[in-house]
Structures are given as C-alpha cells and as structure tokens.
Amino acid sequence: MSLKHGLLGFLDLNGSMTGYDLNKIFMSMFKYVWPAQRSQIYHELKSMEKLDWVSSNIIFQTGKPNKKEYTITEEGKTELKKWLTECDMRDQLKVKSVFLMKVFFSGRNHISENINLIQSFKKECKDLLEVLKVGDEVIDNSSEIEFEKNKVYSDIVYDFEEDYLKMCIEWADKTIGKLENK
Amino acid sequence: MSLKHGLLGFLDLNGSMTGYDLNKIFMSMFKYVWPAQRSQIYHELKSMEKLDWVSSNIIFQTGKPNKKEYTITEEGKTELKKWLTECDMRDQLKVKSVFLMKVFFSGRNHISENINLIQSFKKECKDLLEVLKVGDEVIDNSSEIEFEKNKVYSDIVYDFEEDYLKMCIEWADKTIGKLENK
DNA sequence: AGGCTCATGTAACCGGTTACATGATTAT
DNA sequence: ATAATCATGTAACCGGTTACATGAGCCT
C-alpha cells in the first residue's frame, strides 16, 4: 500500500506532475526499491483523486497529446506526513526472493548446476552494480527536477542498494566456495 | 507466482502434507524469504489440485478435525523441475522496501527524527539476527521433517539472511554517522 | 475461566501484471 | 521507412491480505 505514498512524495517535491512524468521518475529512481507498472500509476492517481489526496487539471497541447497534471492537496500532504512518521519496522526486513527459494530446493540438482546458478546470480549483481553507478551520474546531471534538499537521502538509498549488491556478490563467492569443496 | 512452487518443493521433500503442516513450515523456514498467508496456502493447494500438480485424500480422525493430505503428482514433479531450472535472474534483485522509500522522502523531517528512524531500523535488524540464530537451532533439532540432502542449501539461504542483516546494520551505522555530521 | 492447538475453509477487497488500444510528432 | 517519444487509458486476470466462521480437546 505504498505506491500511493511514493507518488505523493514526488508530487510534494515537484509541485505538479503528470502520470507520464511520475512513471519516468519511478522507473529511474525506484526501479529496485519499489518497481511499479505504468498502468498502476495511472490507476493510483485516479483513486487518490477520489480520496482528495490530489487534484488534477488538463493541459491542452498542440502537436502533442493533452496532459493531465496532478497536484497534491492539503489532505494529501497530511497523509504523506502521517505515512512518513508512522513506521513500525516489523515488515521491513522481508527479502521475498524467488532465487533464494530455488536455492533452498536445489538439493536434487547436480552441484555443478547449482554452482552455475549462483554464478549467474553473481554476474547479474555485478552488472547491476555498474548500471547503478551510471544511473547515479544521470540523476546528478538532471536539471529537470531538483532534489537539493533530498540529495542526502537519495544518496543514502543508493548506498543501501550498492551495499546490498556488494553483499550479494560476497555471499555468492562464499557459497560457490562451499559448493566446490563438497 | 512462486508460492505454488514452494509448496510443491516441500511436498516433494516430505511425501505428503496438509495445508496446516505446509503453513507451519512456511512460517518457520520462509518467513523472510517468502512470507505467505495461511488462507492463501489453502487456496493455492486447491488451485494446484485443479492443475493436477497435486492430489489429495482425506484422513478421518477422532477427537481432532479431519485432515486433507496433499501429495505431489508426476505432473507436479515435472513442473517443479522446470521451475528450478528456468531462472532468468532479471527480477531477482528488487529490494521493494517501504522503509527505503520513507528514507528517500525524509528531507523535510528534522535530522534527529531521521536518525531515530535509522536507529529503530538497526534495532529491528539486531533483534531479527538473534531470532534467526535461535531459529537455526530449532530447525537443527527438528526430527519431524528431515532435510538431510537439503541441509547444505537451507544453510546457504540462512547465510544470505544473516549476511543481509549484518549489511543492514553496517549501513545503518554508516548512515547515522553521515547524518550526525551534517 | 481463558487461551492455545489442531484443522479447514469462505468472502470481500485490494494491489499489481499483462495485454490491448490510439495517434501525432520527431529523430535516425 | 522505422522507431522512439509524448500521453492516456481500459480490461481481464491473478495473487495476496484481512476478517469472519466453526468446534473439539487440552493445558494452566
């Protein structure tokens, strides 16, 4: 139940945004923290309008399709603040990984197959680590949307992702070692 | 779409199990890797019976409610094997964390509030790390269900959870440091 | 007396995924 | 020519959450 609040967060930072803009920013900033579908973003915006958390107005354009700009309301701001302060932490540490489930049930496979599995996981982590580094620069150079105030906190989130991937790589190396000495 | 396959995995290891048993084992083994609701487990078992991945028979009991024991079929075994070998890795690295979203949008709060947030996150990680260590022993001493073949792989999954929590704690310390020197 | 364990489910709802649908403009 | 960008949505479906419902037996 947090896509709504993520959208509110960006609307609060940027004033007004369209579903299209919000989709782009979610894709670039929250791809790994909170993956979202475009259609779902449009859907949540509509449902938040019903809740009076946002209001919309249509901007007519020539040569381009018209667009619908959403703005956060006072109720929306209250809701966002509430969400930001209430944080019970209990459900924050679930990993939810198909990959780990597969590892768990890999006892019947040949060890070599399982080593390959872990190795391809490691490769994926390494690749993503590279993408993440490039992504950082793109965001630094972006002038469209400014997050001066928020820069420290977005950096902190990027740190987490980086640390996570590095941990995964170390775990993979350790695990491959274990399996090879079996 | 993997709760079904997790259930198949346990049925494959244990021969026959009831929804009740599967719920217990999911709760204890996959609490953080793949959290599942009891009602959803019953639901998936029914839907898998329609798919002919499992078959069921009712065991009549006196003094206790009757129970329905599910057994994996040949089709189920084929499906499980297929799932275990096909692993595309692309979606494996999404963190999906409400907590990180909140951190991202914390720019408007006082730094002290945010330090508190990270500190309570750290505490939660530490507590869970303790629970995990105790959980390990419980599973080692469990004689009801044997996973001799699988022990190595379940250990590997526990390693991951442990490493993850340790990484979280280090990240929290680093982050608290950053925020204090602001 | 109160709560836990055993054991199975239904029902309402919500959030998310995938596919389908349109159509002008601009860059390669 | 072809593909990408801009821009919005609908529809069908699926998986997951929460709450409701039952009822015997056993433990403290």
Image (spheres, coloured by chain):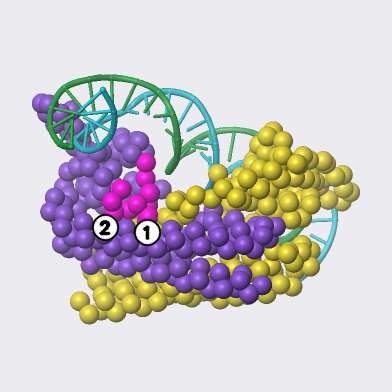
Chain colours: A yellow, B purple, C cyan, D green
Where is residue B101? Give x, y as percent: 59, 56
Residue furthest to the left in view is B62
Towards the viewer: C2 or A32:
C2
Where is residue D6? Give x, y as percent: 78, 54
The residue beneath circle 1 is B128
Look at label 2 and name its amino acid.
Gly
Lower position in the chain sequence, tag 2 or tag 1: 1
Magenta part, dominant SS: loop
Residue at left 54%, top 56%? B99
Separation (CA) of disc 2 from disc 1: 10 Å
Residue range in magenta is: B26-37
Mark count: 2
Q: Which mark is residue A30?
A: none
Residue at left 61%, top 51%? A84
| Vertical order, A163 against B75 (above or below) | below
Q: Is residue B136 magenta?
A: no
The residue beneath circle 2 is B135
**Label 2: element kind:** helix
Residue at left 36%, top 38%? B40
Quarter of the image for residue D28 reads top left
Left or right of B23: which side holds A87? right
Which image quarter holds the C terminus of chain B?
bottom right
Residue at left 61%, top 71%? B180
Visible in this render: residue A24? no
Where is residue A34? Give x, y as percent: 56, 55
**Label 1: element kind:** helix
Look at label 1 and name its amino acid.
Leu
Towards the viewer: A126 or D20:
D20
Q: Chain of mark 2?
A: B
